[in-house]
Image: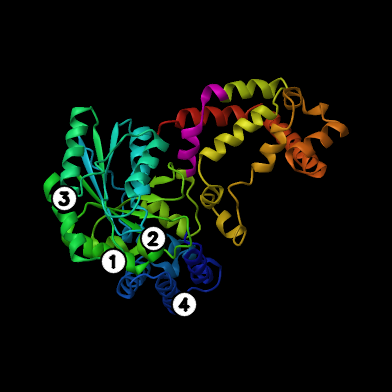
Amino acid sequence: MFDNLSEKLDKALHVLKGHGQITEINVAETLKEVRRALLDADVNFKIAKEFTNKVKEKALGQDVLTSLQPGQLMVKLVKDELTELMGGDAEGINLSGTPSVILMSGLQGSGKTTFSGKLANYLKTKKTKKPLLVACDVYRPAAIDQLHVVGEQIGVEVFSDRGNNDPVAISKAGIAHAKANGFNVVIIDTAGRLAVDEQMMNEIADIHKAIQPQETLFVVDSMTGQDAVNTAKSFNDVLNFDGVILTKLDGDTRGGAAISIKSVVNKPIKFIGTGEKMDAIDVFYPSRMAERILGMGDVVSLVERAQEQFDEEEARKIQKKIAKNKFGFDDFLSQIQQIKKMGSLKDLMGMIPGAGKALKGLDIDDDAFKHIEAIIHSMTPDERSTPAKLNASRKKRIAKGSGTSIQEINQLLKQFDQMSKMMKMMQGGGGKKMMQMMGAMKGMK
């Protein structure tokens, strides 16, 4: 996420992070490189120039030149200004109304239909809502089928009327269906186009006028850079939407849309899409995104994801097994499943301060655990509970069954043994304290 921008900003600020002499001249030169990095990320020239001018003004006003840690102070100023540029505070979604009606808009190919499903899944699991998806894309082939498949994936009902080509009538009928059947959120997926045209704008405006949604969201592909910002402005002029959804942030995005869209349309980014899975959706926190862009990681989001998967009862059981030297491969497999539920490995690593830079260029595959899972699944229940029983003949059988080598099995056993010893050492104090801390933090925002 924003790897190229992060690298260029790091280089621009590098000279000020050292202990060399800091002058007004090299502060100006550094900010010139910062502006260049923003322009390379497809941020509008005017916005990039205003950004660096504000940072320079604040830097000189806060005596960066005479500070004991001028480099760190400059990084903080850049982070604060980036946060402000992207919206300042996180914005929630308006769920007033009975039912709450959310209108989705955007260009074709922006990921609007998929994100409608992600949002429904988010509201169902995180907000305990009962959402209804309404299929109003009557033009794109298989659009209705796609939404039905998405709805089936997440266990959310989809309302459609295949014989009706009037999206206004379908949306109104969908809301009536929701009221009659106890749904408290309605998400209306509308048609996109390959370009902004008058017909599309008139249609989405008619739907908006007819249903008066509590929330109108514009879905934009973050990989399209400045074009995404220009398209958002065109939509906003017609719809006056409430917020922006940035999709495909897990791809090779330059970051221009995320950084400058709020400044252009004066509407907050509310959610981001970070992967293909239905749970790959995050609330957009400008300060956390600014920290990630500057290589500071995002520990808060990492802890929040861990809390969602943290099971206190399961942790106690594992703690007892560790104390009795009974921690086996079934328990190890359970821990792997919890990590996988937290999201893509690349995204998780990007949340660890400094990890993004250290792992630059490495291809972190989400299937990295596959060979470990294959090895464990090829063991008998007895072998999983007592790894010490794995002799040469058993290892040969497991290697054949899992499609791996004996060397890979030996490496896994060595890593498992090291991890078991470390967890045993933590039992005395650190492990218990960590579990208590996670328990206390569970549910906190």
User: Of the residues under marks 4 and 1, which one precedes in the sequence?
Assistant: 4
Q: Identify residue type, mark 1.
A: Ala
Q: Which residue is mark 3?
A: 208
Instruction: Using the rendered view, name the quadrant where residue 413 is placed.
Output: top right
Q: What is the C-alpha distance between the residues marked 1 and 3?
A: 20 Å
Q: Position of residue 442 (x, y in %)?
A: 45, 30
Magenta highlight range = 302-314
Give me the residue at 69% from left, 38% from top.
Answer: 374
Q: Identify residue type, mark 2.
A: Ser
Give me the residue at 39% from left, 41% from top.
Answer: 149
Q: Which residue is mark 2?
A: 222
Q: Position of residue 287 (x, y in %)?
A: 38, 53
Label 1: which secondary element: loop
Q: Main secondary structure of the magenta part?
A: helix
- Residue 96 at least partly seen: no
Relative depth, front residue between 442 and 154: 154
The reply to whether dot 1 and dot 3 touch (C-beta < 8 Å) is no
Q: Position of residue 252 (x, y in %)?
A: 48, 62
Q: Closer to the observer: label 4 or label 3?
A: 3
Q: How is the image coloured?
A: rainbow
Relative depth, front residue between 18 and 252: 252
Q: What is the C-alpha distance between the residues marked 4 and 1?
A: 44 Å
User: Of the residues under marks 2 and 4, which one precedes in the sequence?
Assistant: 4
User: Of the residues under marks 4 and 3, which one precedes in the sequence?
Assistant: 4
Q: Closer to the observer: label 2 or label 3?
A: 3
Q: Which residue is mark 1?
A: 195
Q: What is the C-alpha distance between the residues marked 2 and 3?
A: 24 Å
Q: Identify residue type, mark 4.
A: Asn
* Disc ID at residue 426: none
Mark 4, residues whose alpha carbon is within 10 Å: few (<14), some, or many (≥20)? few
Label 2: which secondary element: helix
